[in-house]
Image (spheres, rainbow, N blue to C red):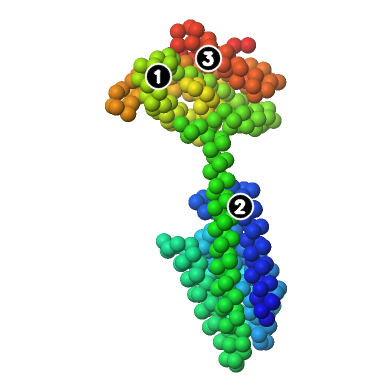
Amino acid sequence: MFSTFFVNTCILVTFLYITGLISQRYKICLQNSSCKAHWIGGALFGGYGIVIMYYSIPVGFNTIADLRHLAIVATATYIGGPAALIATLCLCVGRLLLFGVTKQAIVSAIFMILIGLGCALLSRLSWSRLLKLITMNVFALGIIFCSLLINLDDIYDVLRVYPLQFFISMVGGCLLYLIAESINTSNELLLRLEHTSFTDHLTNLSNRRQLELSLEEKLPQARQRHEHLSVLVLDIDHFKEVNDTYGHAAGDAVLRQLGQILMDKCRSSDVVTRSGGEEFTVLLPNCAFQQALRIANQILGAVDQYEFVLSDGLVLKITVSIGVTTFPDTGGDMSGAALLEQADKALYEAKNTGRNRVCSYQV
């Protein structure tokens, strides 16, 4: 009996580790549990619970004891109530399919639904994860005790199994907590590191590395789908004078506020990048030349009208120069680097012809 409950715990711990690897691969953590994560997580843990039922202990006619409720408890604690309900539904269906539609199986399914509902409600409490997991575990074990009392005629049969089930379940729950916390912490750290490696620390925009990766992705897509891909490259006019006159802190404030202007004027699908120093680049997927030119002029006008406020309350006015190019209008067979070079040439033309203007690359 002890070995069976121990196997139950080992199975769940193993599957929890596998789930951690999956969540790491698809960049899922507790802070961004989406609807898709609830469905996938609920189905996974429901499947884990069904596997655990294969390693159950017969304690009476068509009555079994195992630790499948820990799958619901873990799901409710680390993903949320909706995922716990999905896992519960999978477990109930699995129980009926594996052991037949009998009175005992129906009673077990009903009590499992009660466990799922209770854990879903408890998951909404603003307690620590450890306290919620322990509370859910004790609650589920109380429901299981009632289920065994109804399914078994002899109280001695219940007491023969339940104390060990309670003990292993509590130990297994604590073990699950330690492993899940370790996995979640490592996933959050990985996401943070990846975000840092692809994000400009000053403006919180994409950095040069992300720009190059985005170009490698967007350009082949545009070529395959016969779409346009436009690029804007813009540079702050006389930015060195801002740093020399007001200091680098003032220059940083200008860069941050310009980054926000770009985010406000561009579409949600656009990739806005601080590509270096005072230079910014914007990738505009599925954007024809005239639309890109319109966006560039909107940015130019917004910057010209904006009052850049420094930390000491001083207000600055700046201008930008912008270069525009569009694939495939300027060449159908080119690399991302060549497309950026075209936009750079248009930017140099804008600077050489007076600044504070938009120029486009001409073939």
> Residue 338 in the image: x percent, y percent?
65, 19
Q: Nearer the viewer, mark 1 or mark 3?
A: 1
Q: N-terminal of the two: label 3 or label 2?
A: 2
| Gap in angstroms between the C-alphas marked 3 and 2 | 42 Å
Q: Compared with residue 45, is residue 197 higher up or lower down, i.e. above or below?
A: above
Kindly indicate the quadrant of the structure image that contains residue 43: bottom right
Name the amino acid, label 3.
Answer: Leu
The answer to whether residue 326 is above or below residue 186 is above
On the question of residue 110 being in view, the answer is: no
Q: Which mark is residue 23?
A: 2
Residue pictured at 53% horizontal, 74% vertical: 140
Residue with the mark numbered 1: 243
266 vs 26, left or right, is left
Give yes or no for contact between labels 1 and 3 (Cβ–Cβ under 8 Å). no
Residue corresponding to mark 3: 347
Residue at (66%, 62%) from the top-left corner?
15
Up the image or down, 208 lies above or below 155; here it is above
- Which residue type carries mark 1? Asn
Q: Nearer the viewer, mark 1 or mark 2?
A: 1
Q: Which element type, helix, strand or loop, lies under badge 1? A: helix
Q: Quadrant of residue 304?
A: top left
* Tag 3 secondary structure: helix
Answer whether residue 337 is visible to the viewer in this image: yes
Report the number of discs: 3
